Image: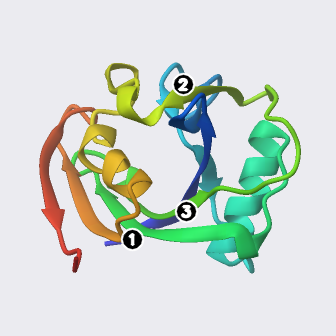
Amino acid sequence: MTYTAVTLCFLTREFAGAPQVLLGTKKTGFGMGKIVGLGGHVEPGETDEQAACREVQEEAGVVVLETDLHDAGVVVFDFPARPDWNMSTRLFVAERWDGEPSESVEIAPEWFDVGALPVERMWQDAAHWLPMALEGSLLRLTVVLNDDNETVREVLDYSTR
């Protein structure tokens, strides 16, 4: 099976004593209308870290340095009904960046409290792994979607904790 290489980067901060994460409403393309993390395809010749930094800048106008990325692991998304959607997604969390997040053609960014993630407006799988990634876990998961390409059939956890 082939899996498209993608990255997701979650910017985090403390605000009024509570941890927050930057997510965004997807305005175009795959996942349009859902709240998602910042990220996208790894271009030929790019490392995962370079792709994550580039995507954050393109989608939210923020500069993240590769040295400020914390590895949160990998989530493989398996779409049995649409194998061309299969993705191997490298996850990063960053607590430092330069600039103020701003809306782009693709994403309308917004800060959310980590304890109140908008999972009802996200891909259903996010509830299974995003809280763990934001808490510092190093994930190794495979998420298998149902034939509707939306709901989760199963989550296989290969993480070593």
Q: Is residue 125 left or right of residue 98?
A: left
- Residue 90 seen from this side: yes
Q: Is residue 154 left or right of residue 85?
A: left
How far across and down, in percent of the image, does residue 58 sit? 81, 45
Q: Which residue is mark 2?
A: 32
- Judged from this view, the residue extending furthest toward the front is 17
Of the numbered discs 3 and 2, the one sitting upstream in the chain is 2
Closest to the camera, between mark 1 and mark 3, is 3
How far apart marks 2 and 1 lie (CA) works out to: 24 Å
Q: Quadrant of residue 133?
A: bottom left
- Rendering colour mode: rainbow
Q: Residues within 10 Å of mark 2 (few under 14, many from 20)?
A: few
**Residue at figure coordinates x 32%, y 20% from the top left:** 120
Q: Secondary structure at mark 1?
A: loop
Whole-percent x, y for residue 1 in the image? 31, 72
User: Disc 1 designates what residue?
Assistant: 2
In the picture, the quarter occupied by the C terminus is bottom left
Return the mark for residue 53.
none
Residue 7 in the image: above or below residue 161:
above
Question: Where residue 92 is drawn, which disc sits there?
Answer: 3
Q: Is residue 146 visible from the viewing direction of this image?
A: no
Q: Residues within 10 Å of mark 3 (few under 14, many from 20)?
A: many
For disc 1, the neighbor class at 10 Å (few under 14, some 14 to 19, many from 20) is few
| 130 horizontally vs 92: left or right | left
Q: Amino acid at mark 1?
A: Thr
Whether pointer 2 and pointer 1 mark residues with C-beta atoms closer than 8 Å, the reply is no
Rendered residue at 37%/47% (across/down) = 130
- Between circles 2 and 1, the one closer to the viewer is 2
